[in-house]
Image (cartoon, helix red, strand yellow):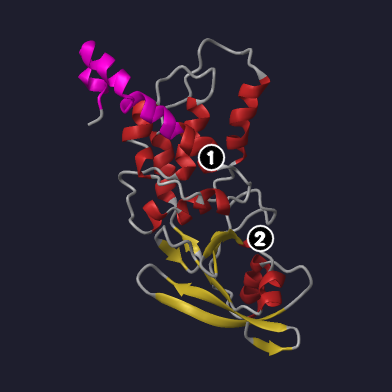
């Protein structure tokens, strides 16, 4: 990390718009317990009042301050500067790579909200109150901890490196589909949607989405892999395929 004084470091922040931009260095006075968002606010207050950054709660609950620190998707409010100082690393803060830049550290994440609207609504069997086993509640409760920071969407190579937003919804929305598909109350058949619209087959189970999740949700193990298993059972099980063909249901065969 570049030091400019006894208690001062230099952080590099990406500045610009979707047309052009680059990193610029800013000196920041270190204070005990500082997180990267504190450093960004220091830069706003002392060097660049026009620096744009999304944030809200500063408590890792709203998901607004998602960005990349040294190339890794993180919440700025949860990433301590001490860790980088201790390792002698420079700090480079950039907007999330997967999404278009609006300005500086602010990405355009509107694609995520359009994707969310495509997911079929919850379709409960009957009306509340519902009687459920606690184990069924526990299984989907983990998924509801998502704060929609979109770090998992940012790190997913299918979206990040290949830009297949027209074929793959990404881990955030496979998580949402798993929440509904695994609910014992939901009666909708979501497996065709998971395969064809959700694009679950594009995931190659690298578990990078689980690694960056600030809520510690096991997205791959507990949501995506079970969805893959259900799709495999429906479309690729040889016995079931023979039964479908015998019943003349070609519409259920994979395209």
Region rendered in magenta: 227-253
Res 5 → quadrant: bottom right
Residue 19 percent coordinates (x, y): 35, 71
Residue 28 position (above or below residue 245) = below
Label drawn at residue 206: none
Name the residue at 38% across, 29% down.
Answer: 231
Compare residues 167 and 104 and report the one nearer the observer.
Answer: 167
Q: Mark 1 points at which residue?
A: 221
Name the residue at 48% across, 78% down.
Answer: 23
Name the residue at 59% across, 45% down.
Answer: 147
Residue 186 percent coordinates (x, y): 50, 19
Residue 234 percent coordinates (x, y): 35, 24
Query: Would you say residue 199 is visible in this rendering?
Result: no
For this view, does 251 lie left or right of residue 233? left
Residue 233 shown in magenta: yes
Q: Name the residue under label 2.
A: 77
Locate the N terminus by quadrant.
Answer: bottom right
Name the residue at 45% across, 46% down.
Answer: 205
Locate the C terminus by quadrant.
Answer: top left
Query: Mark 1 or 2 closer to N-term?
Result: 2
| Disc 2, SS | helix
Residue 191 position (above or below residue 73) = above
Compare residues 97 and 50 and report the one nearer the observer.
Answer: 97
């Amino acid at each position: 990390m570049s030091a400019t004084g006894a208690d001062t470091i230099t952080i590099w922040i990406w500045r610009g718009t979707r047309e052009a931009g680059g990193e610029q260095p800013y000196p920041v006075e270190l204070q005990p317990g500082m997180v990267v968002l504190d450093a960004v606010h220091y830069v706003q207050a002392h060097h660049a009042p026009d620096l744009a950054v999304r944030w809200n709660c500063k408590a890792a609950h709203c998901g607004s301050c998602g960005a990349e620190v040294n190339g890794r998707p993180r919440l700025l409010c949860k990433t301590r500067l001490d860790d980088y100082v201790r390792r002698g690393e420079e700090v480079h803060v950039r907007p999330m790579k997967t999404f278009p830049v609006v300005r500086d550290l602010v990405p355009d994440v509107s694609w995520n909200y359009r994707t969310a609207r495509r997911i079929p609504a919850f379709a409960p069997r009957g009306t509340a109150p519902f009687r459920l086993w606690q184990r069924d509640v526990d299984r989907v409760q983990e998924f509801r901890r998502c704060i929609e920071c979109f770090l998992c969407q940012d790190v997913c190579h299918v979206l990040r490196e290949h830009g297949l937003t027209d074929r793959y919804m990404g881990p955030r929305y496979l998580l949402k589909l798993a929440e509904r598909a695994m609910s014992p109350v939901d009666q909708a058949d979501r497996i065709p949607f998971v395969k064809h619209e959700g694009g679950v087959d594009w995931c190659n189970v690298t578990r990078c989405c689980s690694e960056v999740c600030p809520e510690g949700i096991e997205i791959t193990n507990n949501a995506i892999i079970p969805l893959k298993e259900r799709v495999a059972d429906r479309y690729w099980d040889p016995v079931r395929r023979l039964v479908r063909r015998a019943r003349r249901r070609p519409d259920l065969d994979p395209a």
